[in-house]
Protein backbone atom coordinates (compact mmCIF):
# COMPACT_ATOMS: atom_id res chain seq x y z
CA UNK A 1 0.00 0.00 0.00
CA UNK A 2 1.33 3.43 -0.94
CA UNK A 3 1.59 6.36 1.42
CA UNK A 4 -0.85 9.25 0.94
CA UNK A 5 1.91 11.83 0.34
CA UNK A 6 3.51 9.70 -2.37
CA UNK A 7 0.16 9.36 -4.17
CA UNK A 8 -0.16 13.14 -4.35
CA UNK A 9 3.38 13.54 -5.68
CA UNK A 10 2.91 10.80 -8.28
CA UNK A 11 -0.42 12.35 -9.35
CA UNK A 12 1.22 15.75 -9.78
CA UNK A 13 4.06 14.27 -11.84
CA UNK A 14 1.68 12.24 -14.03
CA UNK A 15 -0.52 15.32 -14.62
CA UNK A 16 2.47 17.46 -15.60
CA UNK A 17 3.73 14.78 -17.97
CA UNK A 18 0.26 14.53 -19.51
CA UNK A 19 0.10 18.30 -20.04
CA UNK A 20 3.56 18.43 -21.61
CA UNK A 21 3.01 15.45 -23.91
CA UNK A 22 -0.42 16.75 -24.92
CA UNK A 23 1.05 20.17 -25.69
CA UNK A 24 3.80 18.62 -27.79
CA UNK A 25 1.30 16.53 -29.71
CA UNK A 26 -0.78 19.66 -30.26
CA UNK A 27 2.25 21.49 -31.65
CA UNK A 28 3.21 18.61 -33.92
CA UNK A 29 -0.28 17.84 -35.23
CA UNK A 30 -1.46 21.46 -35.13
CA UNK A 31 -0.74 22.06 -38.79
CA UNK A 32 -2.93 19.13 -39.83
CA UNK A 33 -5.65 19.54 -37.19
CA UNK A 34 -5.95 23.22 -36.30
CA UNK A 35 -8.54 22.56 -33.59
CA UNK A 36 -5.82 20.99 -31.42
CA UNK A 37 -3.99 24.33 -31.21
CA UNK A 38 -6.99 26.28 -29.92
CA UNK A 39 -6.24 27.47 -26.42
CA UNK A 40 -5.42 30.28 -24.03
CA UNK A 41 -2.41 31.59 -22.15
CA UNK A 42 -2.82 32.22 -18.45
CA UNK A 43 -0.43 33.57 -15.86
CA UNK A 44 1.18 36.80 -14.76
CA UNK A 45 4.04 38.92 -16.06
CA UNK A 46 7.47 38.68 -14.43
CA UNK A 47 7.95 40.80 -11.32
CA UNK A 48 11.44 41.73 -10.12
CA UNK A 49 12.13 42.21 -6.42
CA UNK A 50 15.34 44.09 -5.60
CA UNK A 51 16.44 44.00 -1.95
CA UNK A 52 19.90 45.55 -2.57
CA UNK A 53 21.64 42.39 -1.42
CA UNK A 54 19.59 39.96 -3.48
CA UNK A 55 17.46 40.37 -6.57
CA UNK A 56 15.00 37.82 -7.91
CA UNK A 57 12.32 37.63 -10.57
CA UNK A 58 9.06 35.73 -10.27
CA UNK A 59 6.77 34.96 -13.19
CA UNK A 60 4.46 32.23 -14.42
CA UNK A 61 2.79 31.68 -17.79
CA UNK A 62 1.00 28.59 -19.03
CA UNK A 63 -0.27 28.04 -22.55
CA UNK A 64 -3.02 25.46 -22.49
CA UNK A 65 -4.47 24.13 -25.74
CA UNK A 66 -7.05 21.47 -26.54
CA UNK A 67 -4.40 18.79 -27.04
CA UNK A 68 -2.88 19.47 -23.60
CA UNK A 69 -6.34 19.12 -22.02
CA UNK A 70 -6.73 15.78 -23.79
CA UNK A 71 -3.29 14.81 -22.45
CA UNK A 72 -4.38 15.81 -18.96
CA UNK A 73 -7.52 13.67 -19.18
CA UNK A 74 -5.41 10.74 -20.45
CA UNK A 75 -3.00 11.22 -17.54
CA UNK A 76 -5.89 11.07 -15.05
CA UNK A 77 -7.14 7.85 -16.62
CA UNK A 78 -3.64 6.34 -16.53
CA UNK A 79 -3.21 7.35 -12.88
CA UNK A 80 -6.48 5.63 -11.96
CA UNK A 81 -5.14 2.40 -13.54
CA UNK A 82 -1.94 2.49 -11.44
Image (spheres, helix red, strand yellow):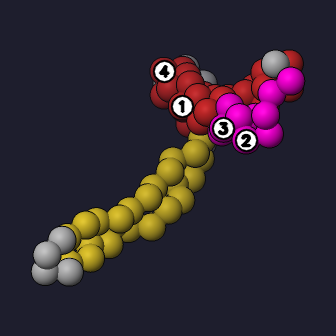
Residue 15: horizontal and vertical position, in percent? 66, 35
Question: In the image shown, does 70 or 19 lie closer to the viewer?
Answer: 19
Judging by the rendered image, the residue that carries numbered circle 4 is: 28
Magenta-tinted stretch: 1-12
Q: Earlier in the sequence, mark 4 or mark 2?
A: 2
Between marks 3 and 4 in the image, the one whose residue lies nearer the viewer: 3
Tell me which residue sits at (71%, 35%) in the image.
6
Which residue in the rendered view is the most extreme toward the left?
52
Give the x, y percent position of residue 55: 20, 70
Q: Disc 3 marks which residue?
A: 9
Q: Which corner quadrant holds the C terminus?
A: top right
Viewer-proximal residue, 31 or 15? 15
- Please state which of residues 34 and 55 is positioned toward the viewer in this rendering: 55
Q: Label 1 belongs to which residue?
A: 20
Which residue is at 26% across, 73% downward? Answer: 48
Residue 7: % across, % down: 76, 34
Say which of marks 3 and 2 sits in front.
2
Which quadrant: the N terminus?
top right
Amino acid sequence: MRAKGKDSLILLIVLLIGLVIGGLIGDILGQSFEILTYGKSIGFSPVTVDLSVIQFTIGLKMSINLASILGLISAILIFRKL
